[in-house]
Image (tube, rainbow, N blue to C red):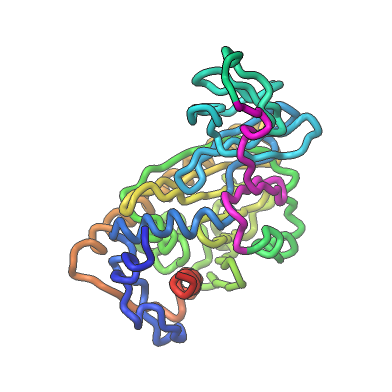
Amino acid sequence: MTIATVRALIEPHDLERHPLARAHTLPAQWYVASDFYAFELSHLFPRCWQYVGHCSQLPSPGCYLVADVAGRSVVVVRDQGGALRAFHNVCRHRAGPLATRNGCGARVLQCQYHGWTYTLEGHLRGIPHWDRVDLFDRRDYGLLPLFVEEWEGLIFVSLEQPLVSLSELLAGIRERIAPTDLRRLHFHTRVVYPIACNWKAYVDNYLEGYHVPIVHPELNKVLDYTRYVTETYRYYSLQYSPFRADSDTSTYGQNAHEAFYYFIFPNMMLNIVGSRLQVNLVQPLAAERCEVIFDYCYEDVCSEAAQAQIAADITYSDTVQREDGEICEWVQRGLRSGAYRTGRYSVEREEGVYHFHELLRDWLRIELAEG
């Protein structure tokens, strides 16, 4: 995808910087054009930290998980020394997969196509039926490593040199949510929702409580909408709301007094309520398709009482998510209708959307200038 192709989709004023009260939203074409989507997938996501899983899924050496990052399959493994390693999930022989599902107890990573084996550190070790191959040095055919780091129990991967360090990206979150300690949590389950909309349309929807009274009537009974505020930081934003004094928050646990909704650029959310963490990742699949991954983490995932509470939490969350999915698909239809190009922002309710759009414009300005 060339810079020239993308430039044709951008009017000069689309990248101008304006204050919130005078700014316009992103152009509809950026949500529907396959060329724009392809540019994001090849230039934005490979250089951004992407959440892939929770450390409790890799409790010991030989445990591994498989994830998609910017359309590429990756495998993350805990090596023999206990360190996290990440590789392209691609055998160096003929591009077969090293793993097709998560697992534990592996002593090596073995290609699921022809059986080449690699150490957990990525070195090529075993090659079946290879005796008569000339001019071959197995040291040249190790697995291709990726950037991998852990933060508060969450595992992140970047395909290329990331735009910012993980510590800079998430600076201040740990302190803001204290005394909640995310490191005490354990992965419980993953739910995936396919949605017929551009990934940005879903992010836009997440980033404002403006729609809550209309789209989420039950959620609106729980949150104190009059005290719903948005805080913006360098690479993320926080939507914060206390619960209504008369609301039933039992599905969130005993310590559920307030809700923290973090959006981390470009496509990740942390929903923190009491002793529950819900990680959302918006995976781009096509110009007008995405899937939203919901990972649920709790301090107690074993007791009978916890199981009942978790089931209620996931059921309640499923209702909210289906409401969001339906309205996002309607928005996507509107974006491709030809009846809409750009809109305006509510100064009171859409600061988070504006912040996300400005981060995206910042990235585009840099990419176009370098191109």
Q: Nearer the viewer, residue 185 or 283?
A: 283
Q: Position of residue 338 (x, y in %)?
A: 18, 67
Q: Residue 22 falls in which quadrant of the image?
A: bottom left
Q: Residue furthest front?
A: 134
Quarter location, residue 161: bottom right
Residue 104 appears in the picture as rendered: no
Residue nearest the viewer, comparing 290 with 206: 290
| Residue located farthest toward the left when viewing the structure as drawn | 338
Up the image or down, 117 lies above or below 190; here it is: above
Q: Quadrant of the C terminus?
A: bottom left
Vertical position of residue 32 compared to residue 77: above or below = below
Task: Please determine whether, in this image, residue 205 is positioned above or below residue 66.
Answer: below
Residue sitting nearer the eye, 362 or 347: 362
Residue 256 position (above or below residue 211):
above
Provide the residue span drawn in magenta: 135-163
Residue drawn at (30%, 56%) of the image? 34
Q: Horizontal placement of 213 versus 97: left or right?
A: left
- The residue depicted at 63 percent of the width and 37 percent of the height is 76
> Going 26% across and 64% down the picture, which residue do you hit?
335
338 in magenta:
no
Identity of the residue drawn at 55% across and 66% down: 239
Q: Position of residue 96 (x, y in %)?
A: 49, 27
Q: Is residue 137 magenta?
A: yes
Numbered circles on residues, count: 0
Across and down, in percent, residue 276 comes to 63, 47
Q: Is residue 206 visible?
A: yes
On the rendered structure, is 368 left or right of 230?
left
Quadrant location, the N terminus? bottom left
